[in-house]
Image (cartoon, rainbow, N blue to C red):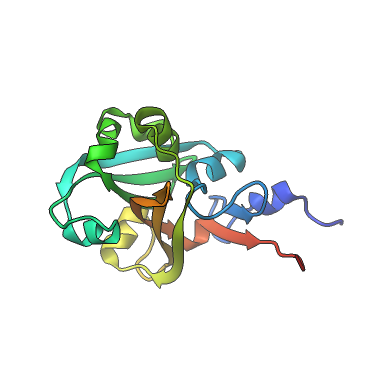
Amino acid sequence: MGEPSQRELDLHTVSGNQPVVVRINHGDEHRFGPVYSLFAAVQASGMSHRSEVIRCEICIDPRVANRLDLPGATRLVHIKRRRFADEEVIATDKAWLPADRAADLLDVDFRDTALYEQLTLKCGITLDGGQETLTAIILDAEQAKALDCPVGSAAFFIERCGRAAGRPVEWRETLVRGDRFAVTTSFSPR
């Protein structure tokens, strides 16, 4: 038997489960940072993506405003979703953006579209930089319930600050099931 194809590596059965893993390639196809999209990665894996919108509203959150280098009382668009690959929960996602720049997102149906695509189309903002931190964690009861998996399961917690024209415009916190997500990186002597 020969080496598995990239498609076979990207879509494989997790022991004891039927769901497949969304593999994120860190190369020409998919990149981390503000242009990385879980929506695009799920679709590229041959699965369908959908979101269950839990919250899409204006809020004030001094902790997040601080991360965006804004005053604590700044109004923010807050979008909270559960993300699915086919019919399996893959992630929960919370994003905050300054309301003065992103209020038009409140009218978007995020069940089957990507935030970054809508940010460009509705608000004229395209992320061109940022910083992302991925941390391995163990899920508590509330997190496990949201991700439809056992308490104590492994997950990735991703924090991202997306920038456009040098300014922070998005703070995002994503929790991804460890048994549904893999990161592959490539490197060369360059």
| Residue 38 in picture, x, y percent from top left | 49, 47
Q: Residue at x 37, y 51 (%)?
A: 167
| Residue 180 in picture, x, y percent from top left | 51, 56
Q: Tell me: residue 89, above or below residue 114.
A: below
Which image quadrant for residue 71? Answer: bottom left
How many numbered marks does the figure carry? 0
Q: Residue at x 37, y 64 (%)?
A: 150
Q: Residue at x 50, y 54 (%)?
A: 33
- The C terminus - image quarter: bottom right
- The N terminus - image quarter: bottom right
Q: Along the line of sight, which residue is nearer the eye, 30 or 81?
A: 30
Check the image and name the residue furthest to the right: 1
Check the image and name the residue furthest to the front: 165
| Residue 31 in picture, x, y percent from top left | 58, 52
Q: Residue at x 48, y 62 (%)?
A: 178
Which image quadrant for residue 130? Answer: bottom left
Q: Is residue 178 left or right of residue 190?
A: left
Q: Along the line of sight, which residue is nearer the eye, 104 or 70?
A: 70
| Residue 42 in picture, x, y percent from top left | 54, 43
